[in-house]
Amino acid sequence: MNITELSWAEQGGGRYLLAVTTPENMEQDRADEIARVIHDSGFSSEGAGRWLSPDDPNAPAELWAALGEIGVALEMDAAVLPPSLLLIVADLQFA
């Protein structure tokens, strides 16, 4: 299974830097599709697989849902998570 890894770093002001790592064997069309979804979710590219979140505090959770809708298998480093994702993780733990 091709698992896309996400990690988050707090940037202040409620914004987060998202680092996206896709598997080396992932087809370029699929990687481009993932990048389009991230961009369409309001994130701005910082280059090298890094994206800055928009001011919307719900954007990380909305991105997570959008990536799930296109069937992206995700793995996230839970060391730093935006608050909207903490709520999702909490829900998943008690489901």
Image: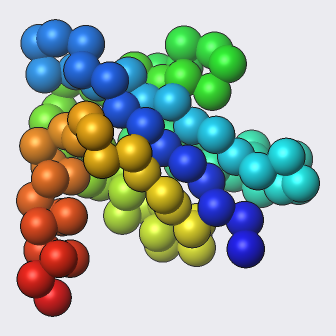
| Residue sitting farthest toward the front | 79
Rendered residue at 24%/20% (across/down): 10
Q: In this view, does 28 lie above or below 69?
A: above
Rendered residue at 11%/43% (across/down): 83
Q: Quadrant of the N terminus?
A: bottom right
Q: Is residue 76 above or below residue 66?
A: above
4 and 79: which is toward the camera: 79
Residue 69: where, in percent of width, then height? 48, 72
Q: Is residue 29 above or below residue 68?
A: above
Residue 70: where, in percent of width, then height? 57, 69
Would residue 74 appear left or right of 43 to someone viewing this image?
A: right
Q: Is residue 29 visible?
A: no
Q: In which quarter of the image is the C terminus?
A: bottom left
Rendered residue at 20%/64% (across/down): 89
Task: State how the image is colored.
Answer: rainbow
Residue 86: where, in percent of width, then height? 14, 53
Q: Can residue 18 be seen in this view?
A: yes
Find residue 64 and report its image quarter.
bottom left
64 and 22: which is toward the camera: 22
65 and 17: which is toward the camera: 17
Rendered residue at 14%/36% (across/down): 57
